[in-house]
Amino acid sequence: MYHQGHHMKKHCCPTLKPIVCDPVHVVKNHYHKAVQPIIHPVEIVNKHHVIPVPCHEWAVVEREEEGQMGHMGHMGHMGCGPDRNNRR
């Protein structure tokens, strides 16, 4: 790519030694996927709580008492001695 001047002369231009410039760097970036593990620690805390739950209990005391001798009311005679309704 040697250019001659605008004037049409018949003489030849000598070939010059080329000048080499510093290279121009063209960077072509290429990206590739790589799996990156991300760890999220989870700590589970089991708390145990005591709550009152009613449980009803009865303390039973049993005692014996002697009743009074006397009138039996409408119950009549209760099997002791001769029965008045079964006379022979």
Image (tube, rainbow, N blue to C red):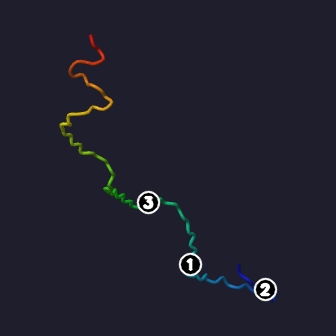
Task: Tell me which corner region of the image, top left, top right, bottom left or bottom right, holds residue 81.
Answer: top left
How many C-alpha atoms fall within 10 Å of the one at disc 2: few (<14), some, or many (≥20)?
few
Residue at mark 1: 23
Observer-side mark, 2 or 1, equals 1
Q: Earlier in the sequence, mark 2 or mark 1?
A: 2
User: Along the horizontal axis of the image, is 82 left or right of 42?
Assistant: left
Query: Where does the C terminus fall, quadrant-wise?
Result: top left
Q: Earlier in the sequence, mark 2 or mark 3?
A: 2
Observer-side mark, 1 or 3, equals 3
User: Along the horizontal axis of the image, is 11 left or right of 42?
Assistant: right
Question: Closest to the observer: 7 or 30?
Answer: 30
Residue type at the position of mark 1? Pro
Residue type at the position of mark 3? Pro
User: Along the horizontal axis of the image, is 77 left or right of 33?
Assistant: left
- Please give the name of the residue rendered at 71% of the width and 85% of the height, measured from the top-left corner: 13
User: Along the horizontal axis of the image, is 39 left or right of 71?
Assistant: right
Q: Height in image: 85 above or below 53?
A: above
Query: Where does the N terminus fall, quadrant-wise?
Result: bottom right
x and y percentages locating residue 31 in the rendered image = 54, 64
In the rendered structure, find residue 37 and report the number of the disc placed on it. Answer: 3
Q: Height in image: 58 above or below 87?
A: below
Q: Residue furthest right?
A: 8
Q: Height in image: 85 above or below 16?
A: above
x and y percentages locating residue 33 in the rendered image = 52, 60
